[in-house]
Amino acid sequence: MERLLQYVWKYRLYSNTDLCTVDGIPVTVLDPGIQNTDAGPDFFNAKIRIEGNVWAGNVEIHLKASDWYKHNHHHDLSYNSVILHIVEDNDSQICRTNGDVIPQAIIRVPPEVKENIEWLLSRDSALSCADRIHDIDSLHLSSWISALLTERLERKTDDILSLLARYNGDWNEVFYITLTRNFGFGTNSDAFEWLARSLPFKYIQKQRGNSVQIEALLFGQAGLLFEENDDPYCQLLQREYRFLQKKYDLKPLDGFLFKKLRNRPVNFPHIRLAQLAAVWINNDALFSKILEDNQLDTLKNSFNVSLSEYWDTHYHFQNSSSQRKKTIGLNATSVVLINTVVPILFAYGKKKQQPGYCTKALEMLEHIPPEQNSIVKSFSDAGIVAKSAYDTQALIQLRREYCEKKKCLYCRIGFHLIKHYNK
């Protein structure tokens, strides 16, 4: 497995204490180089010493030496910079395009390293190291948690900056789209984002003083007002939307895109849209407020909004229900802060080169309670207990980008277990 050999070279896990070329000449590895994930040699800018001479260049790794020819490297000028060829099986001499022989060395994977890797990669569990993860030093784990959180926020930043480029640098529009998407709460996230993209924020702003028209825009554009209905409030929204649709030349989405199946009534798309409407009805210049306000409780209150009275007795337009306030709960508010406010602040700080906003985002996560979901529970069961959303966001990144993809070789926990763990 070539990837394993690359891993062993990168982290110097090979058992050869006295590395030599196949001709018996001692080799000292001063620097294994930087791993290359694109075309070309496997490691750039390596440094090795052979017979007292220091060589700087690239390193190529194959299971068999003859793979050099199989991959046509002997005809590729970019491989002339290779100063050492690492192999497990020396079955051929190799040369550069001009015929010069390239030094080769054999490395062996220590049996215990191979056993630990096979143990991790062969397990069927989504969390392969669950039985051993408690052996990881807390400082080592804390460092990895911080790196994972940064990875997650950087990925979200890339998504936000892509939106920013598409909408000509309009941060308010990007915030509106991101917030709307997250009011879909997973099941309806895509549909809610399509809604936001089809209904520019400027139209919401123009109707800011009219709560009925804001609801009409959101429900009508979502395609949820077109069924025959004798409900007076629904009919009012229908009339308002027809007027606004013509005024702004809007083309509504298909209502079937918004799913109710397997959702609790409080998560019905109608309730979430009504809550989203209430946020915009009650907050003027919300994005500016998020940038300027440093108090987490104040930002939470921006989402502690009251819906119109109609929704006290309805979950949708068809039938009435027993009276109940449909406020945005604390858990839902935390989800919105974690997935909208924090990434927007982090991305804004990166884009504007103002690290204070990035720090604010991180501090906010440290003061939001840990999320409760199956991913967080799986780590808790294994002995890693999250103290805040800072930890849970990192654990979600770990599970989705490393554990589920079986990238144990690139995980710091996996590396520690591979290198140090003995059964």
Image (spheres, helix red, strand yellow):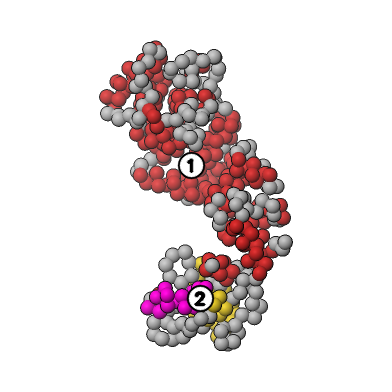
Looking at the picture, which amino acid does disc 1 mark?
A: Ile
Give the image quarter of residue 230.
top left
Q: Magenta segment: does it hold 67?
A: yes
Res 186 label: none
Determine which residue is flagged by label 1.
344
Is residue 15 in view from this perspective?
yes
* Percent position of residue 238, x then y: 34, 19
Q: Residue at x 57, y 78 (%)?
A: 106
- The answer to whether 230 appears left or right of 58 in the picture is left
Q: Residue at x 48, y 29 (%)?
A: 261
How far apart marks 1 and 2 lie (CA) works out to: 49 Å
From which residue to which does the magenta span run?
60-75
Front disc: 1 or 2: 2
Looking at the picture, which amino acid does disc 2 mark?
A: Lys
Label 1 close to label 2 by CB (< 8 Å): no
Is residue 209 in view from this perspective?
no
In the rendered view, would you say 58 is above or below 194? below
User: Helix or strand or loop: what does disc 1 sit on?
Assistant: helix
Determine which residue is flagged by label 2.
64
Badge 2 crowding class, 10 Å Cα cut-off, few under 14, some 14 to 19, many 20 or more, is some
Q: Quadrant of the C terminus?
A: bottom right
Q: Earlier in the sequence, mark 1 or mark 2?
A: 2
